[in-house]
Amino acid sequence: MKELTGVYVIWLRDIKRFFRDKPRIIGSMAQPAIFLFILGIGISSSFTMLGGGKGGKDFLPFMFPGIIGMTVLFTSFFSAVSIIWDREFGFLKEILVSPISRTSIVIGKILGGSTIAMTQGSIILLFAPFLKIPITFSSILKLIPIMFLAAACISSLGIVLASKLKTMQSFQVITNFMLMPMFFLSGALFPLVNVPKWMTVISKINPLSYGVDAMRFVLLKDAAVQLYPLHIDVFVLIAMTIVISTVAILLFNTQE
Amino acid sequence: MAAKNLTFEILPGEIFGFLGPNGAGKTTTINIICTLLARTSGNVTLCGNDVCRDKNKIRNCIGLVFQDPSLDNRLTALENLNFHALLYNVPKKLIKKRCDEVLDMVDLSKRKNDLVITFSGGMKRRLEIARGLIHYPKVLFLDEPTLGLDPQTRNKIWDYIIKMKKSQTITVFLTTHYMEETEICDRIAIIDKGKIIALNTPDNLKKIIGGDIITISSEDNFKLKRYTEELINKKIEDEKDDEIKFEVKNSASFIPKFIKNSPVKILSISARKPTLNDVFLGLTGREIREETINSNDAFKLRMRSRM
């Protein structure tokens, strides 16, 4: 019971901070909007021109779940590594010295990051009508738990890194060398078929690949763009989340 | 930073001060007692619990005010307190009452719904003290509670601590490198380079100096020094270019006699009761203040003012 309260408190803090920071919510919609409305429309037009056919029309719907995946990736990752900020600004000490176990802190943090990422991802759905992407209510209901699951996996990864990285400087490096490849090699922007072997290998260990694949299937209901069956995606995500969050808990427990 | 072979006992209900320059090992000691740092050898028990085996029991019965700020700036004062109360298992129906109570004590009731980021350094400190008390700890640790605050705010914070001490039974363990601040302690341990070099009540510590401190400057300090040394029959160690400083048992009867027989013209003379700074100087041969503003400290002050 005490530990549950701990998880709840850590979660609540992240949620409160998120909803209070309205500029951040709006600001974080800018990047997906740029991707969808500029890159997305631009590339689909060029497909139409280069391919000469109407293949371009299919690119926006293809990219849309990928952009939701991107939003989930960045939001959940940044939310988890806010631990580094807390360490720098002293608040982490207040949590570490409290009678709540480190395990509860990690779980609270993962749930907080997942909830926020799920919310942000859902906001992206508001763009769909403007891009003429048909979305049904039932597909949204299926999308939400997938977003949550993918976010939980990436939040756990963020906590693993936050337990190891002690400064904000190293953080910039991680964003460039990890998040961008994770995004590009997830199948979010282009399908990972007919690509070099090394790309396929990386995409297979990238949790976001499975998240994007599942999101794409529930939104488009098109088996042609599917890499793995839905239940495989979900199973791999759950397995990865369990493994990575266990590592996160172990690492977080050993730090001072 | 390290602390070696420290042995001391803090009695229930007292204000115990840890005094020493930066890097003496004060924060290290606190971190060990508060279970934030593992000890390498020896034994530490708090309220009958061992710091290594019963971490959670200890965490439940202590309140901590860290040297560096540890509030969430993006939450309101009340939210910070609520958060803390929930973490420390304060029963839900008591939380509101306790929050009001501690906010009232540190005069922040009117600002309770403001974001902490809008608070001044002194207000943040007060809020942290309030937070440290909300779960009714048996022992409150204050690590340099007034570092980086202006003198007025510093005085106010000490007033709160004395007030709190009167209203509830609590043991206070504090560290500081401001000499004057330790005067409110029941007992003080002077710590230098990781070792306790003296442990006693402030009054008893001052008795080490034995008498009043006299500071004199004259037209010829060298000549005056020789004359004084002959008179008090002691070598004067502490030397500055423009003045000489020494102790005598009774300054009131000493000064007229001294001036009358002085071989050189005296420009100024002052006598005062010894402070703990004199005690530190007497014990270590260094002034505690000489080391107060090092780069690390300056950085901390900058950090604090930025937040």
Image (cartoon, rainbow, N blue to C red):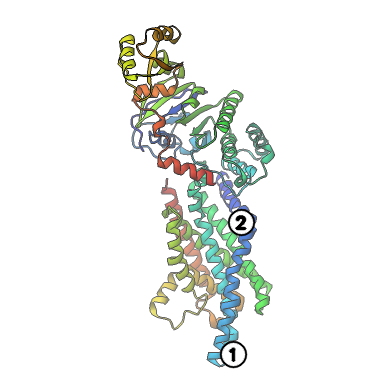
Q: Given the image, on which type of amino acid does mark 1 rest?
A: Lys
The part of the image, by quadrant, that contains residue A135 is bottom right
Q: Check the image and report above or below for B78 versus A36.
A: above
Camera-side residue: A42 or B120? B120
Camera-side residue: B67 or A222? B67
Q: Position of residue B134 (x, y in %)?
A: 60, 35
Q: Check the image and report above or below for A116 versus A47.
A: above
**Label whose residue precedes the other's in the sequence (1 or 2):** 2
Q: Check the image and report above or below for A142 versus B90.
A: below
Q: Residue at x 48, y 48 (%)?
A: A102
Residue B229 horizontal side relative to residue B102, left or right: left
Camera-side residue: B287 or B127? B287
- Residue denoted by label 2: A18
Tell me if residue A40 can be seen.
yes
Residue B91 horizontal side relative to residue B251, left or right: right
Q: Given the image, on which type of amino acid does mark 2 rest?
A: Phe
Secondary structure of the residue carrying numbered label 1 = loop
Q: Position of residue A229 (x, y in %)?
A: 52, 76
